[in-house]
Amino acid sequence: MLVLRPVEQTDLPQLQQLARDSLVGVTSLPDDRERLRAKITGSCASFASAAEANGPENYFFVLEDLDEQRLVGCSEILATAGFDEPFYSLRNRHFTSASRELNIEHGVPALSLCHDLNDHTLLRGFHIDAALVRTPFSELLSRARLLFIAAHAPRFAEAVITEIVGYSDEAGNSPFWDALGKHFFDLPYAEAERLCGLQSRTFLAELMPQYPIYVPMLPQAAQDCIGRIHPDGQEAFDILEREGFETNSYIDLFDAGPTLYARTSNIRSIARSQTASVQQRPQIDARGRYLLSNDALHGFRAIMAELDFQPDQPLSLTPAMCAALNVTDGSPIRLIAL
């Protein structure tokens, strides 16, 4: 059985292996032992905090195969993007110029450095074992975070965003970075992303051009990258799009990947999740597949299971399910259909 739970200090060696296997551009999962150790420590403190509003907390989850005692994925929630330092992105909007004398009005798309997305809750760090890609366990890894937000709503903002990794080729080259960022930093795309993971994107962002960049002046290969998703990032995009997230006018600073946005209250797994009380039974008559979680904080657990759910009735779970979720008879449970 696979269970999603908060990260623990003992997860460090396996977490570093996940970082090694992660996609270039997932800067929140750096392949650096001390950086990961600090991330785990910060996450443990966040789960233990008594926060009553969204602040600097970072909630890091791991997906564990209980039978093999092996980590097969991870994902994060940053309660407030831009809390400690500006959260930079590029705003892609038209600039309109007009001449009354010539009766001409013309709009040109332009990219402007901004931190408009400060104060939003940020989903990040999604990575799953290659063998589990395009399986329901990807849904568990991504969407269980939303059940956690539903259970602890005061800790999060009124809107949620996520950046999807943009296009780069098999050699790790990004046409967008080569056309723009590389002119300001003599670094390959993969190295720039690595530095962001190890340090901060702020020091790179502050050296980027502060004036609008007119899109038609970029090479066509770079223009084609704007809003384009890396093939390995498509699944993360598809899952959240089904949740009600939409693209907007913001793109990633380095690879031009799209940013997804949703009002927290409108997200499907938050708005439509239901609660029930647990009734433990040796066997259940499964009629549908669900994501389900307890509503704990530090003891949060989530699994995927075949269930027979009837609204306003106790939810029957097997002893194995109860053990994975750390619940007993009468415990509250939250669930959403897959």
Image (cartoon, grey):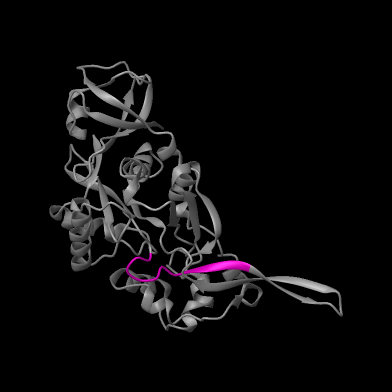
Seen from this angle, which residue lies furthest front? 52
Q: Is residue 286 above or below residue 193?
A: above
Q: Position of residue 73 (x, y in %)?
A: 29, 49
Q: Is residue 86 above or below residue 287?
A: below
Q: Position of residue 150 (x, y in %)?
A: 35, 41
- What residue lies at 48% left-to-right and 42% top-to-bottom? 266
- What residue lies at 42% left-to-right and 64% top-to-bottom? 118
Indicate left or right for 184 with 27 as reference.
Answer: right
Indicate left or right for 214 with 185 as reference.
Answer: right
Query: Based on the displayed image, in which of its 4 quarters is residue 249 positioned?
Result: bottom right
Is residue 92 a member of the stretch shown in magenta?
yes
Q: Position of residue 229 (x, y in %)?
A: 50, 57
Tag count: 0
Viewer-closest of 150 and 308: 150
Q: Is residue 224 above or below residue 265?
A: below
Query: Based on the displayed image, in which of its 4 quarters is residue 290 positioned?
Result: top left
In the rendered view of the protein, which quadrant contains the N terminus?
Answer: top left
Indicate left or right for 216 with 7 as reference.
Answer: right
Viewer-closest of 59 and 118: 118
Viewer-closest of 219 and 199: 199
The magenta span reads 82-93
Is residue 257 a member of the stretch shown in magenta?
no
Seen from this angle, which residue lies furthest left? 10
Q: Position of residue 197 (x, y in %)?
A: 32, 68
In the rendered view of the protein, which quadrant contains the C terminus?
Answer: top left
